[in-house]
């Protein structure tokens, strides 16, 4: 394994660990000593080569697919991530309740789950948009146009939906 590849792999390992709110010692504790902090740290720095078997076990421990840990891959294998879908919550508050009620409740649920109450914007995922499309009984692209017309989504969101249609 090349040094650069090992460092990229290590960066992915570190990103997953920190996303889960774990320190190196936290990994050791959570795994009941199965994963030593010094070993995981050396994988993350690229100082130590990790076998395919150990990488699969580590992915299982973190609860992520192995491909998420491999350098040069992005979720879904996309070459470039689609634009983010960001709801403008301030504008959403001005959309009539009969139109925006389901979206407002959905956004409030996401905010509650994330503990994110900034009240200005909220990032949503492609899956969230698909779920909202089902709730509104529309296709994701039609719903996206509706949200853009309300001023709740930026026009850039069209690219995210087009990317999804590919």
Image (cartoon, rainbow, N blue to C red):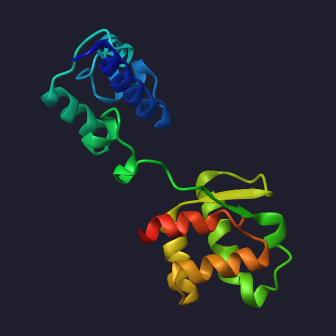
> Between 85 and 96, which is closer to the camera in this rendering?
85
Q: Residue at x 46, y 23 (%)?
A: 23
Residue 127, image x and y in percent? 47, 66
Where on the picture, by quarter, is residue 144? bottom right
Q: Residue at x 26, y 22 (%)?
A: 35
Where on the picture, by quarter, is residue 68? top left
Residue 81, image x and y in percent? 49, 50
In the image, is 84 to the left or to the right of 58? right
Is 144 situated above or below 136? above
Is 7 situated above or below 18? above
Q: Residue at x 19, y 35 (%)?
A: 56
- Furthest toward the right, the residue is 94
In the image, is 75 to the left or to the right of 142? left
> Between 2 and 11, which is closer to the camera in this rendering?
2
Residue 21, image x and y in percent? 50, 33
Residue 165, image x and y in percent? 44, 72
- Furthest toward the left, the residue is 53
The C terminus sits in image quarter: bottom left
In the image, is 46 to the left or to the right of 81? left
In the image, is 104 to the left or to the right of 62? right
Q: How many marks?
A: 0
Where on the picture, by quarter, is residue 51? top left
Is 137 situated above or below 119? below
Q: Residue at x 83, y 69 (%)?
A: 91
The N terminus sits in image quarter: top left
């Amino acid at each position: 394994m090349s040094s650069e590849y090992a460092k990229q792999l290590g960066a992915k390992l570190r990103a997953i660990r920190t996303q889960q709110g774990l320190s190196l010692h936290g990994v050791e504790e959570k795994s009941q000593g199965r994963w030593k902090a010094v070993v995981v740290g050396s994988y993350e720095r690229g100082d130590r080569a990790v076998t395919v078997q150990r990488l699969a076990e580590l992915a299982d421990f973190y609860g992520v697919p192995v491909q998420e840990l491999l350098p040069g891959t992005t979720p879904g294998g996309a070459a470039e991530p689609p634009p983010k879908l960001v709801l403008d919550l301030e504008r959403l508050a001005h959309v009539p309740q009969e139109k925006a009620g389901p979206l407002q409740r959905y956004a409030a649920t996401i905010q509650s789950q994330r503990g994110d109450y900034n009240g200005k914007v909220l990032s949503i995922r492609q899956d969230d948009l698909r779920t909202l499309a089902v709730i509104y009984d529309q296709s994701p692209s039609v719903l996206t146009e509706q949200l853009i017309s309300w001023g709740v989504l930026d026009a850039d969101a069209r690219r995210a939906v087009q990317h999804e249609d590919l």
